[in-house]
Amino acid sequence: MQQNILALKVNQWLAEWDKIAFDDGQHKAKPKEYFYIFSVKASLLRSLSKIQHRQADPSTRQDEIGIQRKHDKKRSDEIREYIKFGYPWSSLTPANKKDPEFADMQKPGWIPTAIVINILGKNDERRGHKVAPSDLITVEEIDSVSKIILPDSMKTKGWEPSDLPPIEVIDGQHRLWAFDKKDNFDFEVPVVAFHALDISWQAYLFWVINIKPKKIDASLAFDMYPLLRDQDWLEKGEEHIIYRETRAQELVEILWSYPESPWYKRIEMLGGKREFVSQNAWVRSLIETFIKKWKKTSGRPGGLFGSKMHYTDEVLDWSRAQQAAFLIYCWKSLEEAIKNSIYDWAVEIRSNNPKLDNIGLDDAFVSSYSLLNTDQGVRAVLRVFNDIFYEKAQILNLAAWIEVRESSSENILDDVKSNLLEIEKQIFSHNIKELCDVMASFDWRTSSEPHLNVETQKKKKAYRGSGGYKELREDILKHLHDKSELFRPIVSKLLGI
């Protein structure tokens, strides 16, 4: 097996760049002033970039590359077909490929664009893992030419990295995974390699290569490279603002259009009659809760979908389908808990409202007398769900939930359905159910509900207006603190008591 690779060293550095505010603590350490260019056998590069193993079902984990990027196996399969005989041969049906009439459509399947990688250094850490000393790749500088020295451990037959693979792919994973690590043909790919490049600079490179010049869907990019969700330099530009609004809008669309969602056709999408909570209110609430950024100085939880976790420097890499499934599961569990309850507040709302058979949901959940059908109620519920599961993310191992995709369909609702089924198998699903059971016992009546006494009505009026968001959230948390031993420690932290 090849052990050394000769590479050209490309010096790219301007004196002005020395003025940039590099920061080791924010994973923005000063990069080396050069990178490398070389060619390497595709199957060898794939072996060195092997999937990082986690505690999850290997049958579902095998299609995820490294620690950041989501892998679309179908896309890699299409590239593999292209490599064989180019385009348009790769797009032909199996029957046409057997027909001699189409033989002249075979062409070379060149891949001239470079795969961009990072060679991990001995001090680089990813999710608590480092490259084993025996698996490290070293770089020997020889003037303008450098030598990439592969690990001696690779000489062992059937070698696999013992922990973290020595190479991570910044851009070009689908091209690389078009090759099987067992492929013996001599197909080389061009490579641009950085060495010990900090993770935030990798996110920056991915953005520059894939988004800025080409205007690729930013929402898709953030699913592929979740670290981009929490980059300070994006926070000051319009792209990041648009991303957060776009993702919030997408999630609201799914909540409104997914048939099993308790908000199916129950969000006011186009304005006009205010029978339901408006689309705009939902978007604002998601941006203020699940998609918000975490600030260390605030002491408050960040957004479960939109910021680094408090216990690590990484972002929970759930896709849009997973995020939507989580929200639907939370709301569905709350609606079911209320529907099955006989608490006084719920019984009294039901006694004043005709059954809404056309919706099929409980009056205590959908009535105009229920805070759950108000802007303040939606925001408060989202905040409680977000804050509690953000704080419990490490304990519940939320990062272990692996996305399920419907490969035969491009309909996002199919992917949401698949992920909803998977939630039942996750540890955190039981916590959602228990949380909703306790939340169902909270008095969700609005100030206009006819059965309220004067004192309760006065308290409910405090939930109206912009100040009502905070007031309602705190009252729900106090209720959880009093009624739930399971959530009391987390709630005490959230309340600062």
Image (tube, rainbow, N blue to C red):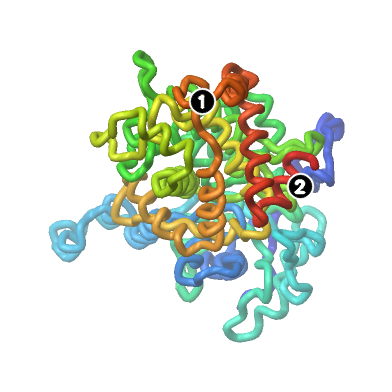
x and y, in percent, of residue 386 in the image: 60, 42
Q: From the viewer's perspective, is residue 292 above or below residue 271?
A: below
In-image side of 192 versus 120 (left or right): left
Disc 1: CA contacts within 10 A as few (<14), some (14-19) or many (>=20): some
Observer able to see residue 320: no
Query: From the image, which quarter does the N terminus lie in?
Result: bottom right
Outermost residue to the bottom: 157
User: Tag 2 or tag 1, which sits nearer the N-term?
Assistant: 2
Identify the residue at image location x=64%, y=85%: 156
Residue denoted by label 2: 34
Q: From the viewer's perspective, is residue 313 above or below residue 184?
A: above
Disc 2: CA contacts within 10 A as few (<14), some (14-19) or many (>=20): some
Separation of marks 1 and 2 at Cα, in angstroms? 71 Å
x and y, in percent, of residue 181 in the image: 50, 72
Question: In the structure shown, which secondary structural element does the residue marked by tag 1 occupy?
Answer: loop
Which amino acid type is shown beneath numbered disc 1? Leu
Residue 150: name its quadrant. bottom right
Residue denoted by label 1: 452
x and y, in percent, of residue 314 in the image: 68, 50
Outermost residue to the top: 272
Question: In the structure shown, which secondary structural element does the residue marked by tag 2 occupy?
Answer: strand
Q: Nearer the viewer, residue 158 or 439?
A: 439
Identify the residue at image location x=52%, y=48%: 436
Q: Nearer the viewer, mark 1 or mark 2?
A: 1
Q: Which mark is residue 110?
A: none
Identify the residue at image location x=47%, y=35%: 217
